[in-house]
Image (cartoon, rainbow, N blue to C red):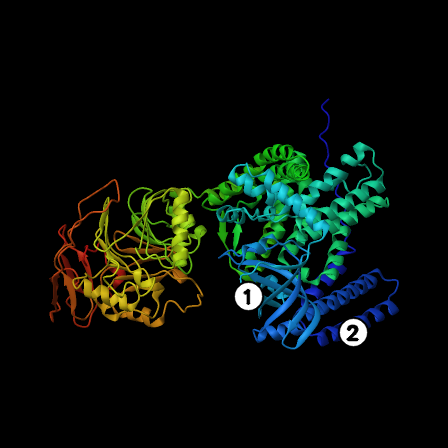
Amino acid sequence: MPEPAATPPQVPPPDLRLVGPAVAAWVAAALALGASPFAVTLVCTVALAMVAVLLARHRTSATAVALAAGLLCACAGATAGALAGTAVHRGPLPQLARRAAEVTLEATVTGDPRTARAGSTVVLEADATRLDGPAGTAALRTPVLVLADRRSWLDLLPSTRLRLTGRLTLPTRDGSADRIAAVVRVTGQEPPHVIAPPTALQRAAARLRSGLRRATDGLAPDARALLPGLVVGDTSRIPADLDDAFRATDLTHLLAVSGGNFTILLALLIGPSHLSARAERRGLAARLGLPLRLTALLGGALSLGFVVVCRPDPSVLRAAACGLITLLALGTGRRRSLLPALATAVLLLVLFDPWLARSYGFLLSVLATAALLTLAPRWSEALQRRGMRPRLAEALAAAGAAQAVCGPVIALLAAQVSLVAVPCNLLSEPAVAAATVLGFAAMAAAPVALPAAKCLAWLAGWPASWTAVVARTGAALPGAALPWPAGWPGCLLLAAVTAAAVLAARRMRLLRRPWVCAGLALLLLLAVVRPAPLTRVVTGWPPSGWRLAVCDVGQGDALVLAAGEGTAVVVDAGPDPHAVDGCLRALQVERVPLLLLSHFHADHVDGLPGVLHGRAVGMIETTPFARPPGRAAFVRRAAAQAGVPVAEGAAGERRRLGDLSWEVLWPPPAGTSAAAEDGPNDASLVLLVRTAGLTLLLLGDLEPPAQQALVEAYPGLPPVDVLKVAHHGSAHQDAQLLRALHPRLALISVGAHNRYGHPAAATVAALKAQGAAVLRTDTDGAVAVTGSATAVTAGRGRRRRTGARCRGCVACGITDSWIPPVSMPTSAASTSHARPPPMRRRCASSNSGTSSPCRSRTCRSIWERRSCWRARPSWRRWCRPGAGASATSSTAPSPTC
């Protein structure tokens, strides 16, 4: 007879007795950090009185004892938080920072120096211990943030004592800056003045970290960057694109050393964590026959060494504290229950450092661990009852539980929900374990045997490279991340959605309905992969036959001109590589023969790596005025790394790519126009584009002086169908240029809630007064314009027709067609054709109410709006009366109307 299937072990109920006091202390500490000492004292007094009453009247009640314990821990947390907040926000430094005083400090470095993301400023955290200021000398212990401009400050180690002179300023009150009393900007260019070297323990840790870097020097780029981050949290080598890929796939916890690394090491010593509640012994300690107390001592030394080498980050402290409590239970022969250990660790750490109560890293670490200890075993048991293999069930349950619990907090921080987080974590988990073990072995061997360390690092490089491949592949999927409301509303919404989904799955018993599960998995796969035909049918984006797309990249510009199947000319790259990359992927652009950068401001060029990522880019063309020089150098560096040539555009240059043609109207050569040399904005490339019968003008960030010079240089500048409004719709617009262009559709690329007030209400009103339909990316999302002058917005799925309006006024029209340059279908090479002759204009009006022929923008009406349409194959237009006609009823516009 066949043997019965193995029954998964029953999961014991979790021990929740210490969870309430730990949570009470955590919440109280977080609130007390920003509260007044008087309010904290008053609340604690009331709470202690309630404890006395509870214990006096209900001493034998378990509920009363638990409530009293929670109140006592809350009082302890509030007291610790109030003291920590007072130590930071009071004292001489904040008062001096308000006056921007220059002082001399003695400080002890508390963290590794790092380079600011933008620029070369070195940033390090320190505790000021002595102040020499205008009022004299004072001893103190206040956390400060030090900013220095010398690269030699990067060599400092934690515990180093410095003497520095600088100017104090108040920090911005956001995130971790709350625990900083003042920012010290070091004056002068001298190297740091060290008055006491780092401790021997920190020097030893530095030798281990530098040894790991030396051992990984010969690895492939991704492995060389990732391995130090996976092992000790050293992210100094990780490029921005790989960091963005890890963020998009929710794998960032691998780069900042988390408790998972310590759990792997501890599991080697005492066995897997899921066996911690059992009596049997596992791991190297059991195989070597080490007694329990010696095993606990070795584990404690491993915990302390891990904290020193990997730095006391919130997740590292949490993991080490849990490990020490577990080892204490192991050494004393007590039951090893991890949930009480986690609660005890949280309580002790919050009382020791109350600022952890406001740390999102600490919150994520605790939530993930709690999910692994409570939800994951039950979900794994349910999957095993349905026939899934134990190892696969445990891995899937762990990844799902951690994502379900941590997802709302991640949405709070990133304003997005990753749809590939669970599969990416499942695929990378085995590789991370192997890379961590081999990486720690390489770090330990590097000081004594560098060749052996390099061999171990080479072995560890394979799983590290696999992790990078998983992150890059997952991030490249069209539906990798789902936009989500930001802030606490988005966090609470996702928490409610997740809870409702879990409850619905339990009530419907989805695990017993494999076909329903398969259907849901298929829908999720389609949402992530987003096949182009299906996406277009469901969302209407991108619209069929689109000719121009304005990407929603925030406060910046990124425009795409269709030039064939999978091919487009891109104008500007926006400020965010991830945003412009996502837009191009949604538009299915794989080849970019030419990338035009109108000027070198960050909101137009910083997204350049996103355009270059995974696409064939033929050439980059820029304005000849390389200002600001720092961003111009950035463009040249990025282009050189990608092997893309860089050229300079010039007024009069004309190009054609298939049925797409354009002419560069501005700027003129250097030394010929004072307006073009007034600043980077006025040096913007201005393009007159013709595509599918539409006329488009892209103004870059041109300011009024340059706009006026443009009108003077091109007195025959034709009216256009589509205008990319200059400088994100700012108030600085030339009214004469707007009247001359008379656009039907005005597009404004602008970021939501930007601090510049763009677009200006006066500019929008002026455009609407010209009869233009105004679309803006901050409210409408990305905008695409088709060959029939139909604008489709991606943000809200709205479709707007923007045909010519027959208005009750005299309008000037174009009677001569524009002669395109010679066709060059396979390249975007320059032509030397002369500028086309000025367009002749004529104005006409009519008092007749009957239908009459009209050409281009010559419309005849008195008080009624008229609609225009193409009556015959020839480009003749007719106007007819109709009170209900509007811009939304216009069809098949001519190239000039």
Question: Mark 1: which secondary structure?
Answer: loop
Most foreground residue, 196 or 176: 196
Identify the image quadrant of residue 58. bottom right
Q: Between marks 1 and 2, how big is the CA–CA gap?
A: 47 Å
The answer to whether residue 781 is seen in the rendering is: no
Identify the image quadrant of residue 576. bottom left
**Left or right: 411 as drawn, with respect to 28:** left
Of the two numbered discs 1 and 2 in the rendering, the one whose residue sits closer to the viewer: 1
* In the depicted structure, whether residue 85 falls above or below residue 639: below
Quarter of the image for the C terminus: give it. Answer: bottom left
Most foreground residue, 134 or 470: 134
Q: How many marks?
A: 2
For label 1, count other residues whose C-alpha is less than 10 Å away and answer few (under 14), some (14-19) or many (20+). Answer: some
Q: What's the amino acid at mark 1? A: Thr
Q: Which mark is residue 45?
A: 2
Identify the residue shown where x is 46% and y is 44%: 476
The residue beneath circle 1 is 187
